[in-house]
Image (tube, rainbow, N blue to C red):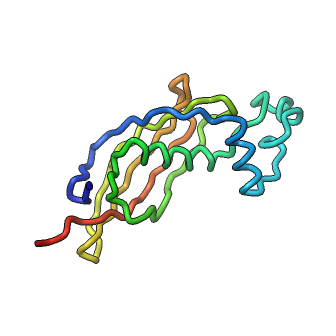
Amino acid sequence: MKYYEDINIGDKVTTPGKTITDTIVTTVVALAGYTEPIFHDEEFAKKTPFGGRVAPGLLTVMVAGALAEQADYWQGSTIGLVGLDNIKFLGAVKPGDTIQVEMEVFAKKESSKPDRGLVWDRKTILNQRGEAVAVADHIHLCKRRPKG
């Protein structure tokens, strides 16, 4: 178990990669109800600057959060994600691309409640060529170490 007190500004983690398959894109697009043809119509998407279908940017951010969990940095410390800030989409993620995350903790703040604190991290999402495709700041509510 990792607590708020165990998390340090400057901590860095690089996650394993995950391939964003056609099935993942198709499933998320269908579940979310996206209607833009760039996400589901390959013939339409071939005529765009991307040259084919792309994943929704929020799918990329969602998978980045899961990859950070899988890297086991948080180790049960989070109560919940309370915010996303400064999201920037820098490049397209296409079915077949593999993404990974470089995460760095950049701020902490004690809460008014003694059993929790806030932690900010920046996730830079890279494709298989090492190109940044998105950046997002995540704000986590974390458990404090119990007193006594």
- Judged left or right of residue 90, residue 105 is left
Of residues 58 and 87, the one drawn nearer to the viewer in this rendering: 58
Which quadrant of the structure image shows residue 40?
top right
Image coordinates for residue 45, horizontal then vertical, percent: 83, 35
Image coordinates for residue 62, horizontal then vertical, percent: 56, 50
- Judged left or right of residue 95, residue 14 is left
Which quadrant of the structure image shows residue 147?
bottom left
Name the quarter where the C terminus is drawn: bottom left
Which quadrant of the structure image shows residue 131?
top right
- Judged left or right of residue 11, residue 51 is right
Image coordinates for residue 85, horizontal then vertical, percent: 49, 56
Task: Residue at the far left: name it.
Answer: 148
Name the quarter where the N terminus is drawn: bottom left
User: Who's the residue at 71% across and 39% down the image?
Assistant: 23
Task: Residue at the far bottom: name it.
Answer: 113
User: Who's the residue at 81% across and 48% down the image?
Assistant: 36
Where is 103 relative to 34, above or below?
above
Where is 22 relative to 1, above or below?
above
